[in-house]
Every structure is written in C-alpha cells, then in structure tokens.
Image (cartoon, helix red, strand yellow):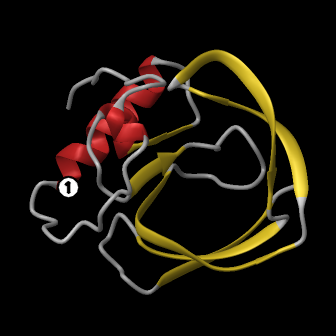
Amino acid sequence: MAVQKVVTYGHRALREVCTDITDFSNVDSLINDLFDTMYEFDGIGLACNQIGINKRLFVVDITHTEECDTPLVFMNGKIEEGTGSCVDSEGCLSLPEIRINVERFDTITYSYVDENFDNSAVRVFTFK
C-alpha cells in the first residue's frame, strides 16, 4: 500500500480511454493504493487514470453521508441507463483548486465488478 502521485490536467492518461481490467491478480494492491492516495489528498473518489494507470477502476468513500456505510470499489463499470439531469459544483484531484458546475444524469443504473470480483454487481444511483 502506497500513496501515488496524482497526475494533473494535461497528462496524457487523463485523455486516453481506459481499458477493462482482465488480470485481477494484483488488483487488491492497486485498490489499496487508490484508497491511500485518495485519503492522503482528502478526496472522496479517485480513478486509476488519475494516478497514470489507464484501467477502468475507481474508488469512492462517501461514508460521511447517509448514502453508504462502506467505501466502494468499481471495476470495468458501465452506465446501463441514465435519466433526468442535474447540475452540481464538482472538484477533482487532477484539477486542484478548481470547482465547476457539471451537468450529469439525475439517476443512473451502473453495472460493474465489485471488490469481491462479483461481475454481476449493479447499483442505481440518484444524485440530488
């Protein structure tokens, strides 16, 4: 487990399309690095490409809210359905000290592989 360098705007890893994880043998270490790095920089979410690795994996910790009581891991995720629209101010560790209004779906159905390597995980998220 180690804190990694967070890449910032202009880094090529932030522009490339991330690829699916096909070899899960070292993914636990990568997940731990993502959490360690996210916590070090006071983030609530961090994706692999933000540490220069173009894999479809991100972590989120919103345990400070009523939404979730454990940190979450999302691998090889895909938005299956999106409805509605909402705008909220967002920040990003790869764009330090910048916050902008971002329009997103109001509700999404998201399929992914979870931290237990269950590839049938599906969640519905509502952002309000």
Name the one closer to the observer, 11 or 114. Answer: 11
How many callouts does the rendering have?
A: 1
Name the one closer to the observer, 101 or 42. Answer: 101
Name the one closer to the observer, 81 or 26. Answer: 81
Q: Residue furthest top?
A: 97
Which residue is depicted at the point 78% across and 50% down?
Answer: 66
Which residue is depicted at the point 86% across and 41% down?
Answer: 88
The image shows residue 7, relative to residue 106, as above or below, that is above
Left or right side of 111 for 36 = left
Left or right side of 110 for 98 = right
Residue on which disc 1 sits: 27
**Which residue type carries mark 1?**
Val
Quarter holding the C terminus is bottom right
Query: Measured from the top left, where is residue 51 in percent x and y?
Result: 32, 33
The image shows residue 96, relative to residue 19, as above or below, that is above
Query: Measured from the top left, where is residue 60 in percent x and y?
Result: 53, 46
Quarter holding the N terminus is top left
Which residue is depicted at the point 78% across and 29% down?
Answer: 100
Q: Quadrant of residue 106?
A: bottom right
Q: Quadrant of residue 34?
A: top left
Q: Quadrant of residue 75?
A: bottom left
Left or right side of 81 for 36 = left
Which residue is depicted at the point 69% across and 18% down?
Answer: 98
Query: Measured from the top left, where is residue 50 in percent x and y?
Result: 40, 35
